[in-house]
Structures are given as C-alpha cells and as structure tokens.
Image (cartoon, rainbow, N blue to C red):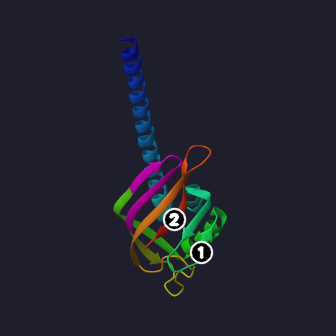
Amino acid sequence: MKYFLVLCLSLVGLQGCAEAKIEAEIDEVKQIEELYEQWREAVATADIPSYVAVLDPDVRLIPPGADVIEGAAYYEQFLTPVFEAATYKIEVITPPRVEVLDDIAVAEYEYVIHLKLKNPAQGVTEPGALTASRTEARYFDVLRKSESGKFRVWRHTWQ
C-alpha cells in the first residue's frame, strides 16, 4: 500500500507538471500571436523600429529569387527605401499557425500584401522586396527565444 501511495503521488505530480507545461506553451503561442499583430501594425504604419523589434538580431530574410539579408541591422537598412517607396496593407488569409518546440517555434501563415506606390514612376527597387500591387504568399518563419524569454523571428521566407 505504501508503494501504491508513492506511485499515486508521483503521477499526480507529473500531471501537474504536464498541465504547467501546456499552460506555458499556450502563453508562448499567445506571445507569438501578439508579435505578429505588432509586425502587421508596423508594416501598415511603416514603423521600422517596431518592425525590427520583432526580429532576432541574427535574423535571416530569405526572399525568393534574391540574396539573403542577414542580421537585423541590414534588415533595417533594407526596409528604409522599401517604406519610402510604398505603403502596405496586409490582408490575413490564414493567421499564423504556431508550434512551439522548446526554445524554437515555427509559424506558417498566408497573407495578401497590398502595395501602393508613393511615386509610381519610381517603384520599389530593393532586391527581395515585394513589387506587385497585390501579392498573395504563404510564409514560413522560425522563431527563437531570446535570453529575456521572448520569441523573435530568426528566419523569414515565403513562396
């Protein structure tokens, strides 16, 4: 009977641990969903500092058909002429579906990006930037948890 009681108490403890882990993952998914809300708002308002705030310092932007942009500082430099040339509106087709795998998470989502040129004669000229007035794409991101416990976009690509 003594061993049975110890076994039961151990199982109750394990169940409590599992429930705590599930709650922590739910909180992390919510934090990541908020990150994407912040990112969409930053795009809509051309707020480069808010945009870059969701990026890991070692981010890699992997645009189809263009060179990889490595690092948040270079990503920020890339964004300046992009937002100077156009305004953007994001239409969410499929919201980010997030899976947390310890300190890494993945997100898959589908957006339509509506681009409006500020000067139609100039256009968007940055390699890797969206240039069409309407682009529907499926995105795939890998996020990494920072030392502060917040997830940031570490790899970003689409097709």
Q: Which residue is mark 1?
A: 81
Q: Position of residue 110 (x, y in %)?
A: 37, 65
Magenta-highlighted residues: 97-111
Q: Nearer the viewer, residue 55 or 60?
A: 60
Classed neighbour count for the residue bearing mark 2: other residues with Cα under 10 Å, few (<14), some (14–19), many (≥20):
some
The structure residue drawn at horizontal position 48% and vertical position 80%, both measured from the top left corner, is 131
Residue 87 screen position, x and y as percent:
48, 71
Quarter occupied by residue 9: top left
Seen as rendered, the residue at the extreme left is: 93
Q: Position of residue 26 (x, y in %)?
A: 41, 42
Q: Amino acid at mark 1?
A: Pro
At 47% from the left edge and 46% from the top edge, which residue is drawn? 31
> Is residue 11 placed above or below 98 in the rendered structure?
above
Q: Marks 2 and 1: which is nearer the front?
A: 2
Q: Nearer the viewer, residue 7 or 127?
A: 7
Q: Residue at x 59, y 62 (%)?
A: 59
Tell me the element at label 1.
helix
Tag 2: residue type?
A: His
Disc 2 marks which residue?
156
Task: Provide residue 154's location: percent of width, then percent of height.
Answer: 56, 59
Residue 103 highlighted magenta (yes or no): yes
